[in-house]
Image (cartoon, rainbow, N blue to C red):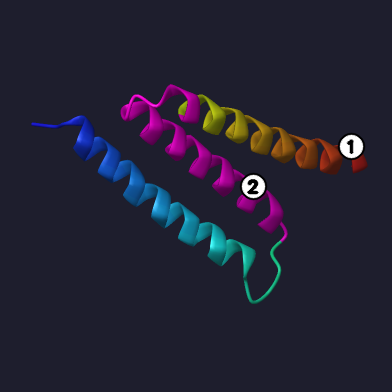
Amino acid sequence: MNTSTEATQKLEQALATTREAINVIDNLIADHDYQDVASLVGQAAAKLLEAASALMQSNDEAGLAALEGADDLLDAVYDIIDGETDED
């Protein structure tokens, strides 16, 4: 049987793995064309995982703050994408 505690633990594991991936992306040996966008998407994913974990713990303030952070990061992603497509 699944519990909210188990869900929170899985979310925290996913968050740790996501943060590790972001660190790898940010420290690649050779630059990658989409490295900046991939890092921002990873950071947004981390914020969404933080939000889910906070909400599973009934911490709505932290959950909503993390959602806003994810939204800001995704806005930055779209700004980069829009800037790239405007150059074409």
Residue 66, percent across and down? 53, 33
* Residue 7 appears left or right of 73: left
The furthest residue to the bottom? 29
Location of the C terminus (image quadrant): top right
Instruction: Tell whether 10 sits left or right of 50.
Output: left
Left or right position of 30 against 59: right
Q: What's the residue at 20%, 39% (across, down)?
A: 6
Q: Position of residue 5 (x, y in %)?
A: 21, 36
Q: Can you tell which of label 2 and label 1 is closer to the viewer?
A: 2
Q: Earlier in the sequence, mark 2 or mark 1?
A: 2
What residue is pinned by disc 2? Answer: 40
To which residue does mark 1 refer? Answer: 86
Residue 82's quadrant in the figure?
Answer: top right
> Which SS type dominates the magenta stretch?
helix
- Name the residue type under label 1: Asp
In the rendered structure, which amino acid carries the disc numbered 2? Leu
Quadrant in the picture for the N terminus: top left
The answer to which quarter of the image holds residue 16 is bottom left
Residue stretch rendered in magenta on the structure? 33-62
- Give the residue drawn at x 60%, y 28%: 68
Q: Residue at x 79, y 36 (%)?
A: 79
